[in-house]
């Protein structure tokens, strides 16, 4: 029986459901802290960055139809050497750090719902939720959660739409004071590079390109439509929240800012509804990311990208669960030793670097006439996205030097591991013979 392909609407739904995930609930308060009431402009700027990257994804996705996503693009342009190997490890690390972000966020929304504020208990919930979903994936429970994904996506979008309508019903202009001074613009810029991660789900369209109807035409349309839809939702959510609640209050309750913003219009019911929506969304994202991260780690171990005794991988108790053990363990470390702002900036930086190489690969392939696209526009996009990566590093250095040092360290470790370990093993070709068994953001 022929496998059914995804339509344009289904492809857009896949990306929108992924993008409007845990990040809008998790780091909204962080965004208000950085940009204040100028946050809607930061979302617009982040959306423009996403469109720049999406241009390369769309053009490359029509020529390179592979579920390996960006790694296939990069491998096609520069080969499967040290850089490609290092980026593969970095992609897995982006999953690991995302799990830490979701776990911290879950605790931030869960404890206020039950009326408890206790740092020690917050740490316990963070550890517990990673352990719980690790156990679910170990025993195969992720399949059951996966079947509920459509309803989870529908629920969180409906809750956000209700939030937008309710927020505008108590709209107060006195809370909105846009600041376009040099300090205000700096806040918009800093928030835009952090919130870049909120648009990163559009890459799933190219990851699923082999399973999409007429991918040459559908993939570009789906990428453009999904980014624009999400941009409008984010701007409306931010305007609704900022016009309903003073910015200082959203900063004070930054772990569950959207739930607090729902109270003026919907009362305690609104707080509870947004909290439940956040918990459902975060749980869904955590489960999917843990599943993908575990598969990523196992695939990288088997192919020699991550050093691991091959004999151990053949043992029944270890085998495919080895990736799960490693992913959960390192995610716990990030969750315990870094705050939500730090892990968000790390994810943004890692994924932005991958995007830089995707755009660079697009430029190289366009020069060889192996991909479509305006070379001048591609170069301009490359400059802008490189600037975004530099800005993330500057923000980390100014706001938290520990985060800055760890971020640089992650890149160095990935390059060293790939160079010193993997170079001694056989090289692989990702674009055709080797198919990654996991999704790439």
Image: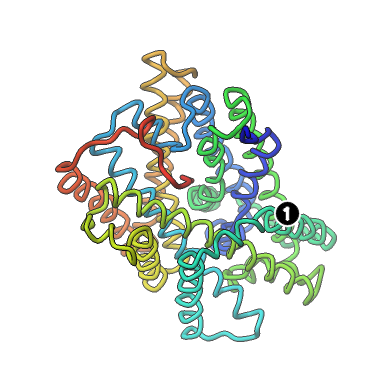
Instruction: Note whether residue 387 is visible.
Output: yes
Q: 202 or 119, which is in the foreground?
A: 202
Asked if 97 appears above or below 361 in the picture, the reply is below
Q: 377 or 363, which is in the foreground?
A: 363
Instruction: Note whether residue 33 is visible.
Output: no
From this viewpoint, which residue is outermost toward the right?
169
Residue at (56, 57) in percent of width and height: 23
Q: Where's residue 165, x and y in %?
A: 82, 56
Q: Where's residue 145, x and y in %?
A: 61, 61
Residue at (40, 56) in percent of width and height: 346
Asked if 273 appears above or below 310 in the picture, the reply is below
Crowding around mark 1 (Cα neighbors within 10 Å: few <14, some 14 to 19, many 20+) is: few
Q: Quadrant of residue 254?
A: bottom right
Left or right? Give the position of 292 relative to 259: left
Q: Where's residue 226, x and y in %?
A: 64, 39
Figure quadrant of the N terminus: top right
Residue picked out by circle 1: 154
Asked if 365 appears above or below 90 in the picture, the reply is above
Left or right? Give the position of 358 relative to 278: left
Q: Quadrant of residue 173?
A: bottom right
Q: 218 or 404, which is in the foreground?
A: 218
Q: Where's residue 130, x and y in %?
A: 47, 70
Q: Quadrant of residue 111?
A: bottom right
Left or right? Give the position of 347 relative to 426: right
From this viewpoint, which residue is outermost toward the front?
1
Asked if 117 appears above or below 391 in the picture, the reply is below
């Amino acid at each position: 029986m022929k496998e059914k392909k995804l339509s344009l609407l289904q492809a857009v739904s896949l990306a929108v459901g992924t993008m409007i995930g845990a990040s809008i609930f998790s780091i909204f308060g962080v965004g208000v802290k950085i940009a204040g009431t100028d946050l809607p402009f930061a979302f617009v700027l982040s959306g423009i960055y996403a469109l720049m990257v999406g241009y390369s994804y769309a053009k490359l996705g029509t020529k390179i139809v592979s579920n390996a996503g960006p790694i296939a693009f990069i491998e096609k342009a520069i080969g499967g050497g040290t850089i490609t190997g290092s980026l593969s490890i970095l992609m897995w690390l982006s999953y690991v750090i995302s799990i830490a972000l979701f776990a911290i966020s879950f605790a931030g929304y869960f404890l206020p719902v039950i009326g408890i504020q206790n740092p020690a208990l917050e740490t316990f919930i963070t550890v517990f939720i990673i352990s719980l979903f690790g156990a679910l994936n170990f025993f195969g429970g992720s399949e059951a959660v996966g079947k509920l994904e459509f309803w989870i996506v529908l629920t969180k979008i409906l809750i956000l739409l209700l939030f937008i309508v309710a927020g505008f019903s108590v709209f107060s202009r006195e809370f909105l004071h846009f600041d376009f001074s040099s300090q205000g613009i700096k806040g918009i810029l800093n928030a835009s590079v952090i919130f870049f991660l909120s648009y990163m789900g559009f890459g799933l369209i190219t990851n699923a390109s082999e399973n999409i109807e007429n991918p040459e035409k559908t993939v570009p349309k789906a990428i453009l439509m999904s980014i624009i839809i999400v941009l409008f939702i984010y701007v409306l959510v931010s305007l609704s929240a900022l016009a309903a609640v003073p910015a200082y209050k959203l900063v004070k309750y930054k772990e569950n800012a959207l739930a607090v913003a729902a109270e003026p219009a919907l009362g305690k019911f609104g707080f509870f509804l947004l909290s439940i929506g956040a918990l459902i969304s975060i749980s869904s994202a955590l489960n999917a990311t843990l599943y993908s991260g575990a598969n990523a780690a196992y695939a990288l171990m088997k192919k020699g990208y991550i050093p691991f005794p091959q004999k151990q991988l053949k043992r029944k108790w270890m085998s495919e669960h080895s990736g799960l053990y490693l992913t959960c363990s390192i995610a716990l470390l990030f969750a315990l030793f870094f705050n939500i702002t730090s892990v968000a900036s790390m994810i943004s930086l890692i994924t932005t670097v991958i995007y830089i190489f995707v755009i660079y690969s697009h430029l190289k392939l366009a020069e060889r006439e192996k991909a479509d696209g305006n070379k001048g526009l591609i170069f301009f996009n490359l400059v802008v996205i490189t600037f975004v990566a530099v800005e993330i590093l500057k923000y980390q250095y100014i706001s938290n030097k520990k985060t800055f040092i760890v971020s640089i360290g992650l890149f160095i470790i990935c390059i060293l591991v790939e160079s010193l370990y993997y170079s001694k093993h056989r090289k692989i070709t990702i674009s055709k013979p080797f198919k990654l068994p996991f999704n790439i953001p």
